Amino acid sequence: MAQGSTIGRVAPTVAARRTSALPEMVKDAALFALVTLGLAIPVVAYRTDLGQGTGLELTGRWGLVAGLCAAVFVLRLAQRLVLGEVSRRRDIRTLAEADSKAPARLARPGRIIGPLTLGIALTLPLLAAFGSGSLSEGRYWIDLGILILTYVMLGWGLNIVVGLAGLLDLGYVAFYAVGAYSYALLSTVFGLSFWICLPLAGLFAAAFGVLLGFPVLRLRGDYLAIVTLAFGEIIRLVLINWVDFSGGSAGLSSIPRASFFGIPFTAGEGGFASTFGLTFNPMHRVVFLYYLILVLALITNLVTLRMRRLPLGRAWEALREDEIACRSLGIDTTMTKLTAFALGAMFAGFAGSFFAVRQGFVSPESFNFLESAIILAIVVLGGMGSQLGVAVAAIAMVGAPELLRNLGFLKAVFGEGFDPNEYRLLLFGLAMVAMMVWRPRGLISERTPSVRLGARAR
Amino acid sequence: MSVAGINVLVDETRARMAEADKPLLSVRGVSAYYGSIRALKAVDIDVNEGEIVALIGANGAGKSTLMMTIFGQPQAREGTITFAGQDITRLPTHEIARLNLAQSPEGRRIFSRMTVRENLQMGAAVNGGKHFAEDLERMCVLFPRLKERIDQRGGTMSGGEQQMLAIARALMSRPRLLMLDEPSLGLAPLVVKQIFSTVRELNRTEGLTVFIVEQNAYHALKLAHRGYVMVTGAVTMSGTGQALLDDPQVKAAYLEGGQH
């Protein structure tokens, strides 16, 4: 079937598509409607209700089925008419541009969105406080900011492994877990402070990264993905079953809270507020946590950007493109892969210990496969290797579901029983499909060269 | 590259040639296997310092396999490979590359999402980018097309430009031996001529040793001082480039009509 949105950029295809006439589109849309009918009959057409007696009663819903089919027909037709036109124009333009100079357009989206995002991130507590009247009432926004930034940091960390080095890692959350449990155990058992545990957690996670790296060095693509997936599950299962060590599925609680470099956030004498002559406000701790994760995330970003300019970082990118060519240029691919795994894992470890100190409680529940999938989705949606793309994708992936909570007004439209939250995954899926259709290579798919004319290679 | 630099290179080359009569690269009785299939059958090949040596043969004769075997991928199961007096038969690929043996692989294998400059930086990785600026300048003189496209992504260039990039990338490591695998593959005759004349120029002015694997027998043998002919994994003939060009058997098998 000739889709209106294929990626093929071949001249004959463009010419052929121009001639695709209305009857053909109607036929195509009818076919879609037919498929919908087929799908709807077993799923939608009958509803089972509790009857008068003990049995179930079937209620026919043929009107709904007809409505669905009609909707699909109309939407598909509209898609072919509108989208087909758009993508044809884009194809022609792409063909024309293929030979012209591409680098002029590189990195353009970063020029505005990047600083804007950073500016909002830096001033978010202020914005939240002013926006909602007081700091305490802005807590929701700051908490959301912390959540998003955690995922931004995890995304940037995974970006080193997946985006730069091209090693598909489905078990990234394992390193996050290692970091979280490192802090939880070190602080509860040995009474070490957060600032000592943070680098240790990173170190442990990096060690696990190398540990995972060794057996998978020879694997690529699908095989690598499966092994890393298994690794993530192994870590989780160990945490669940080794009760003496990790507290099992009950997790570890009463983990010491973060302090301001040794000064606790308490109301009494010697607390943060009294030391700095402020009135006590529990929000101080939240704001501190917010800036802590912001700094951690920015460090991740800076290190990644710096690494890309160094020979090692370039070797990662080269490795993603062609391993054999790398080796024949004298690059030790073993070391290159291991460092990518280790560095990516280290940042997950940092993020993990931040997670533990913020929650004050860790359990294996927080580190299931879905987390890995979300982080990976952030990297892929962002456009593999793009730092800004990852940040934007994290905001979209983590922030958008939160938006759904605020759509209460839709109840007026769809009736009292409507809960927008239930449609979360549906919308999520739709967004993914839309992404694949319009931006198959991620939100920001352009790769910024690490060196350019004018900018001296440092 | 300055004239003085070239002179230093030439002097070094002469000094090395004087100190040892042994070939720079020597392949002795090498056999390689893909699984149980014997792709190379006791191959003997020598490349002397300052020479251009061509290896010609039909599709699937094992030419590229030999080149990859010299680079340790696959490793030779029998025989020895010596480079500059050192046995490299069992070394991993990246360590062989660090001995200043550079390769422009079959199918070019440039990093297509990276810019020309970044590709060249990867080529200079072996010696830590020590002479990067100087060598970059030199490549821009050798291949003016690359200079024009220095900040363009490798994958957006034409085949000929990509081939130039692959060779330039290999040259960035200042190799003692440059190995070229099918540099003419899929290129227009004019571009092939251009690339081959650049290689000849490099050999003449800098004494660069070149080992070239080609299907395009006419051009390769014209370029080479010596040549080898490979048939189904074994070397069947060897001689000077001109002698092989004149050989009736070679003519019949690889040079139908004498021109390409």
Image (cartoon, grey):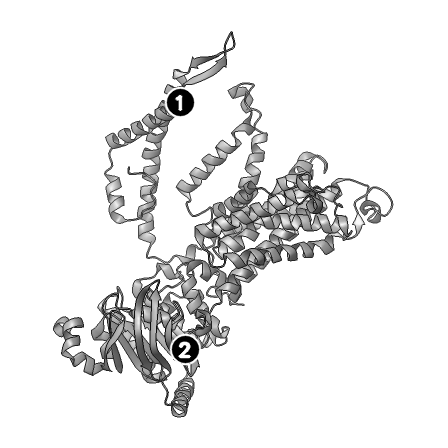
- Relative to A237, is B247 above or below? below
Mark 1, residue position: A42
Marked residue chain, label 2? B
In x, y percent, where is residue A383? 47, 49
The single residue placed furthest to the top in the displayed view is: A52
Instruction: Tell which tag, 1 or 2, sits nearer the viewer.
Output: 1
The amino acid type, in three-letter code, at marker 2 is Pro
Tell me: A227 left or right of A270: left
- Quarter occupied by the C terminus of chain A: bottom right
What residue lies at 37% left-to-right and 29% top-to-bottom?
A75
Pinpoint residue A154: horizontal percent, then vertical percent: 58, 49
Q: Which residue is at 24% across, 66% downward?
A: B59
Residue linked to disc 2: B175
Res A371 quadrant in image: top right
Label 1 – label 2 distance at C-alpha: 69 Å
Could you say where residue B242 lies in the image, as x and y percent from the top left? 20, 82
Residue at the extreme bottom: B18
